[in-house]
Structures are given as C-alpha cells and as structure tokens.
Image (tube, grey):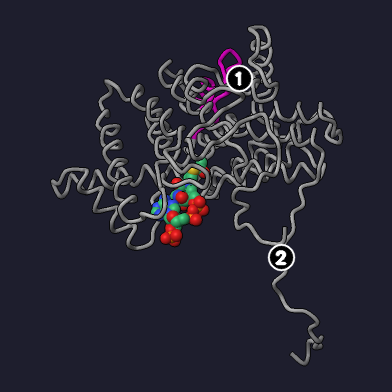
Amino acid sequence: MSEIVPGLEGIFVAKTRTSRVDGEAGELTIGGFPVERLAPAASFEEVVFLLWEGRLPTASEYRTLRNDLAARRALPAETLPLLRRAAQRSLHPMDALRIGAATLSLSDEDPLANSRGANTERARTLIAAFPTLVAAYAQLCAGKNPVEPDPMLGHAANYLQMLNGAPATAETVRALETYLNTVVDHGMNASTFASRVIVSTRSDMTSAVVGSIGALKGPLHGGAPGPALDMVFEIQKRAQISGQPIAEEARRWAEKAITAGERIMGFGHRVYKVRDPRAEVLGAAAARLFADREDAALYRDARTVETELRSTLARLKPTHRLETNVEFYTALVLHGIGLPANLFSPTFAISRVGGWTAHVLEQIDDDRLIRPRAMYVGEFDRPWTPIEER
Ligand code: ACO
C-alpha cells in the first residue's frame, strides 16, 4: 500500500477480544456483552476481570481481585511530595496523574522483570492506585490532606470517599460504576493505540499506561466533557437572561458556533455515524441519578440542548453525520455525582486504564512491533552549506 490513510481511519492494526465498535449500527460490545447490558449491572472489578480473562469472574475470583486491588491502593512514599509540588504549580490533574502514575515504578517489587506476569502485577497496581492519585491530588489542590483509602470499600465507592472525605450514597456509587464500565474500552482509540505502540517495543506496562494518559488528555479524546457541560450552563444562563425558551437559545448558540467554524463539544465521532450507544447508557444513568433531585432541571435542560444541537448540526453540516457522543452525558453524570469538571478527564482515565492494561496484555501476547511508515515529502540531494555561509 503506497497511499496515506489520514488519521489511520478504517485501518485494522490488531486483533482484540476486549471490545468491538460498530460505528454504522451504533453498537458497542465489551467482552461479548452489549454495553447496555453490562455497564448498569456490573461492578468495575468484574469488568476488569472480564477484559483480562475474557469471562466473568466466579464469586470467589471476584472477591480475590477486589481484595487484591484494595490492598494496592497506597502510593509510594515519594509520590505525595511530588503531587504537593504539582498542586502548588496548579498543574492540570491529568499532568498530576501522569507524574503520579510514573512513580508507581518505585513500589515495583521486581522493577527489571518484564515477563507477562510482572506486567500483570503492574496492571493491578496501576488500576488500584489511579483513584488514590486523582483523589489525593484533588484534596491537595483544595488545601486538604489526602483521605486514606478504605480497603473495605469497592473501587468506585472508595474513590468517591477519598474525593469527598465522606461515604458516598448507593445511587452515586452505582452511577459512577455505570460510567466507569461504559467507557472502560473502546476499540482502537488513540490512547489505547499509544499503549499498544509503546509495549510493542517490548517496553513495560507502566511505560505504556503513562503514555496513554498523555494521549487521553487532549480535547479531541478525553478532554471534551468539561467544555460540554460548560456549554449547557452557558445556554441555560442565556435563556435565563433573555427569557427565551432554552431550545431557542441552544439553536442560536449552535448556529453562531458552527458558522464561526467552532466544534461543538460532545458531538461527532470518528467511528460512530449514529448516536454513540454510550450516550444512551449514560443518558439513562443521568435520568436515574437526577430523578427527584432539586437540580433535576439540569437533566431536562441538557436533553433539550442535545435535541437542538443535533438538529442544528444536521441542518448546517448536512454532509456529516454529527451525533451525540459519550462526552455529552459523561459531563452530566459526573457532575451529578458531584465531581468538579477538572476531574472529568482523570476519572475517564481511572476507567480506561482497565482497557489499556487489557490491550497491553494482548499486545504482549502478539509480540509484534508496531511500526508503520511515513511518506517522505521533503527534498532530495540538497547541497551542504557551511554554517558561516548561511
Ligand atoms: N461540531 C461541529 N463540527 C464538527 C464537529 C463538532 N463537534 N465534529 C466534526 N465536525 C465537522 C468538522 O468541522 C469537519 O467539517 P468540514 O469538513 O466542513 O471542515 C467535519 O465535521 C469532519 O470533521 P473531522 O475532524 O474530519 O472528523 P473526525 O472524525 O476527525 O472528528 C472528533 C471526530 C474529533 C470527535 C470531532 O467530531 C470533534 O472534534 N468533536 C468535538 C470534540 C469531542 O466531542 N470529543 C470527544 C470525542 S469522544 C471520545 O473521544 C471519548
């Protein structure tokens, strides 16, 4: 093949048993389950087991994994001073997570080992420690001391307790767990590809995951939900000031943004050409979470804004099929759980590390260097000019 495929769109680069994205039908299968069936029912630990082992755990396998992850939540002693320094510099939480994740090598019992077993151990530590890193950084940024992890709690409940310093309600734990399960893996997305490329050189699990955090940080991948929620708030505010219906303000806002060539956050997807099925699952989770709450109007307004934005995009960008993506309802669910917007992307990472680690293990088994080609478009045979003559 001698032609360039921009963005590697449509190119298969690996076989995987983790997940399948059908962009035309709008279907996502995770470990053999439709996302709609798996995400609202499973615990995050069960989904991690499913991705790693290709099947659901038995009750005793589940307990063993849950206890093992709970036992790995503590951070190396050197990590907190680094996070403190990051907080003083007001680093982005994704940068703090990247710095913190790299320090997990310090607690590696056999840092030079690179067997599949050694990398599986690292995968467990990474998954277990991500919530501790994110919550500790959030507490430090707020001028507080980090909350110790509670080994009696599951992954999601413990994360919320470390963030808030108080036990979470069953509803918020369920909503968070549904979110974590929904976005845990998604075919060959950019951050997963980054992990596979890194480990295909026979590098290690921690290096691969640290690289993936960098890839996830960008607004075209994991950084969109914060801006998506800001947009809903902005439209709500405009409607309050103008006295116009929110649908009318949403339409005006979208027309202006699209005409100015801006992208509407939470819409469009490289693979999905219909509504992202994850938006469906998270929309339902948001409906359950906001039902009977004082701020239930936010959920209703978000639905109205979504409908208006979809139809305005269809009208003004008729040649593209720009539908709601996962980030739109991610924003609503995570906000409803009580997370501030700057923790949306790191919370995505807390989930997606499950997928990254599963792909890394698959790639280790494949053991094939990923090494595409670049088409040279520069000059040839240039004469050399000494520096003093340039
Ligand atoms: N709003 C307005 N126009 C858009 C949007 C959008 N959200 N998305 C794509 N377009 C337009 C582009 O401007 C372009 O129009 P043009 O051909 O007239 O110039 C056309 O649609 C095609 O755009 P591409 O960039 O080629 O589409 P691509 O497949 O690369 O983009 C992406 C996918 C990056 C997600 C894009 O839709 C986007 O930027 N969306 C907004 C950000 C966002 O929601 N990101 C989260 C994605 S989900 C995830 O990663 C978990």
Q: Residue at x 51, y 29 (%)?
A: 182
- Of the 4 image quadrants, the one containing the N terminus is bottom right
Q: Which mark is residue 126?
A: none
Q: Which mark is residue 375?
A: 2
Residue 219 visible in rendering: no
187 vs 370: above or below = above
Name the mark nearer the viewer: 2 or 1.
Answer: 2
Q: Is residue 155 magenta?
A: yes
Instruction: Judge left or right: residue 31 versus residue 279.
Output: right
Mark 2 vs 1, N-terminal side: 1
Instruction: Judge left or right: residue 145 versus residue 295.
Output: right
In the rendered image, residue 78, in percent from the top left (x then y), is placed at: 70, 36
Q: Residue at x 43, y 40 (%)?
A: 274
- Of the 4 image quadrants, the one containing the C terminus is bottom right
Q: Mark 1 points at which residue?
A: 45
> Badge 1: few (under 14), some or many (20 or more) residues near its Cα, within 10 Å?
many
Instruction: Judge left or right: residue 367 versus residue 42.
Output: right
Task: Identify the residue at the far left of this view.
Answer: 243
In the rendered image, residue 208, in percent from the top left (x then y), is placed at: 71, 41
Q: Give the range drawn in magenta.
A: 144-162
Numbered disc 2: secondary structure: loop
Q: Is 24 or 208 nearer to us in this picture? A: 24
**CB of mark 1 near ligand 1 (< 8 Å):** no
Residue 194 visible in rendering: yes
Numbered disc 1: secondary structure: helix
Amino acid carrying mark 2 in the image = Met
Instruction: Judge left or right: residue 168 versus residue 148.
Output: left
